[in-house]
Amino acid sequence: MLHTWKVREDDLSPALSQGQREDGQAAALPQGERENGIIRWEDEGGSPPEAIPVRRAEARINGFLEDYSYVIEGLLALYQVEFDPRWYQAAQDLADTMITHFRAPGGGFYDTSDDHEGLIVRPRDIQDNATPSGNAMAATALLKLAGLAVEPRYVELGKEALAGVQQFLGQYPLGFGQWLVALDLSLIHISEPTRPY
């Protein structure tokens, strides 16, 4: 699913889910549920979801790291609204797929999956721009998931990603805003997490 364009422009599922939780507007959540139902349907095969153009034409490329991390964030937002275990499980499944196909040696993630079309170099963008980088969102999503999950490996992976950019956070905070959110999450002491459902 080409999440970075479709969700930000069309769905905004994390924002709508947050609005549902705080304002109690019943109209916000069904849109997020509907979009995330499509995401799960596309991911049933166990392989990375492919990019889905907005008009539901046939997929042409694999999803990018941004796509995965934003969808995980949206699924966790839906879980926080409804406490429905299917949203948590979907987020965990997608996170595991993201780790399998995007993880870079030494920490962090590549922007493209290991089965993406052949590139000379696999890109690995770490700096936030007008929107957060896929790496910053992946670290944030993993650390949020770690707050709910039984497996501490999500904390380790989030902190590994943070280690690669920590030197820049104090010097260039405007270029690493989402990373600062991830850093804040990493400082929360998680002791004996329990399964959220």
Image: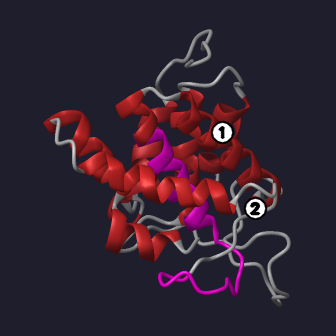
Residue 113 versus residue 98 in the image, above or below: below
Farthest top residue?
192
187 left or right of 1 in image:
left
Which stretch is magenta? 53-77
Query: Regarding mark 2 in the picture, which secondary structure is present there?
Result: helix
Image location of residue 100, percent across then percent down: 82, 53
Query: Regarding mark 1 in the picture, which secondary structure is present there?
Result: helix
How far separated are the C-alphas under marks 1 and 2? Answer: 15 Å
> Is residue 109 shown to the viewer in this render?
yes
Q: Are marks 1 and 2 in contact (CB under 8 Å)?
A: no
Q: Nearer the viewer, residue 43 or 96?
A: 43
The answer to whether residue 161 is magenta is no
Where does label 2 land, which residue?
102
Q: Nearer the viewer, residue 157 or 98?
A: 98
Image location of residue 53, percent across then percent down: 54, 83
* Location of residue 98 by image quarter: bottom right
Where does label 1 land, which residue?
92
